[in-house]
Image: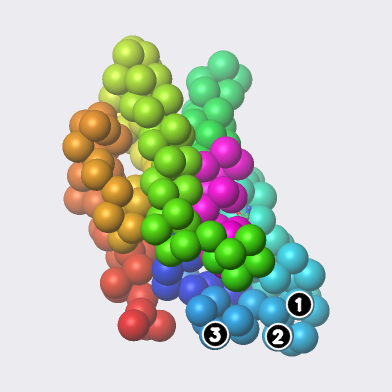
């Protein structure tokens, strides 16, 4: 397998964590997003969306979308499980993951921020305000949910990492890089610390990647 990756991509970071948890180490190919390499013809042939990650399989197939890739890994390498066996619990884990991957992350993606700056002509301060606003809207709801629900344990769901944690940790790293004040989210940062104490999470961090800058 070959992972198309970029050290700062939080969607790719999710896949790196899942691969590490499953004990898998595919070849890596780095797509420099700041240089616009995601829009190069060669990469668009693999992923017409021009987004990382993508996972090329040994049989020539290409998987796109981090959550679809992680669910593929879960189905092909079930141990350790990243989704609970119980259907209701599985829905809870997926809901947390989707709240991050569908409702928070897309609003703060590079292409959206570049559109705000270069097409709509907002100032860098307004762009940063947009970023922080949508992070806070998303994190406030997650903090409330995780703090009050008894299913929350050491991790987002119980005492072992799941897909929810795989999504949470990169989003927090992203917010920290943008200097968002995380003090209103003690449950989120507590869970993040639990995750980062585990080698598969720590080894997936942006600063530990070969293409880091
Ligand atoms: N929903 C997609 C999101 C992928 C995505 O947005 N990737 C970002 C990096 S985190 C990207 O490639 N951005 C390139 C750009 O905005 O031009 C997934 O989960 O894989």
Q: Position of residue 133 (x, y in %)?
A: 43, 41
Q: Determine contact: label 1, label 2, CB under 8 Å.
A: yes
Please say whether residue 114 is one of the residues in the magenta stretch: yes
Q: Which mark is residue 40?
A: 2
Residue sitting at x 44%, y 33%: 137
Quadrant position of ligand 1 = bottom right
Q: Position of residue 168 (x, y in %)?
A: 40, 43
- Viewer-closest of 99 and 199: 99
From which residue to which does the magenta span run?
101-116
Secondary element type, mark 3: loop
Is residue 124 found left or right of 85 in the rendered image? left
Q: Is mark 3 within 8 Å of ligand 1?
A: no
Q: CA gap, disc 1 to disc 3?
A: 15 Å
The residue where tag 1 is placed is 44
Numbered badge on residue 35 = 3
Q: Which mark is residue 55?
A: none
Magenta stretch prevailing secondary structure: helix
Tag nearer the camera, 2 or 3 = 3
42 vs 109, nearest the viewer:
109
Residue in front for this viewpoint, 206 or 85: 206
**Label 2: which secondary element:** loop
Q: Reading the chain from its start, which is encountered first: label 2 or label 3?
A: 3
- Which SS class for mark 1? helix
- Taking 44 as reference, is 134 above or below it? above
In front: label 1 or label 3: 3
Q: CA distance from mark 2 to mark 3?
A: 10 Å
Q: Residues within 10 Å of mark 3 (few under 14, many from 20)?
A: few
In three-dimensional space, the C-alpha distance between marks 1 and 2, rounded to whole angstroms, equals 6 Å
Specify which label sits upstream in the sequence, 1 or 3: 3
């Amino acid at each position: 397998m070959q992972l198309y990756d970029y050290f700062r991509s939080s969607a790719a970071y999710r896949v790196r964590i899942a691969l590490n948890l499953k004990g898998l180490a595919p070849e890596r190919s780095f797509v420099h997003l700041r240089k616009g390499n995601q829009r190069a013809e060669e990469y668009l042939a693999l992923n017409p969306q021009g987004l990382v990650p993508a996972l090329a399989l040994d049989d020539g197939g290409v998987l796109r979308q981090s959550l679809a890739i992680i669910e593929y890994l879960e189905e092909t390498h079930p141990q350790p499980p990243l989704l609970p066996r119980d259907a209701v619990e599985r829905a809870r884990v997926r809901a947390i993951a989707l709240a991050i991957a569908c409702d928070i992350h897309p609003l703060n993606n590079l292409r959206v921020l570049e559109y705000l700056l270069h097409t709509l002509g907002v100032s860098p301060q307004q762009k940063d305000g947009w970023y922080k606003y949508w992070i806070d809207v998303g994190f406030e709801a997650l903090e409330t949910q995780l703090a009050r629900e008894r299913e929350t344990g050491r991790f987002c769901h119980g005492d072992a990492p799941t897909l929810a944690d795989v999504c949470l940790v990169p989003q927090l790293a992203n917010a920290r890089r943008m200097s968002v004040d995380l003090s209103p989210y003690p449950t989120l940062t507590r869970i993040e610390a639990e995750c980062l104490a585990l080698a598969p999470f720590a080894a997936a961090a942006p600063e530990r990647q070969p293409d880091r800058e």
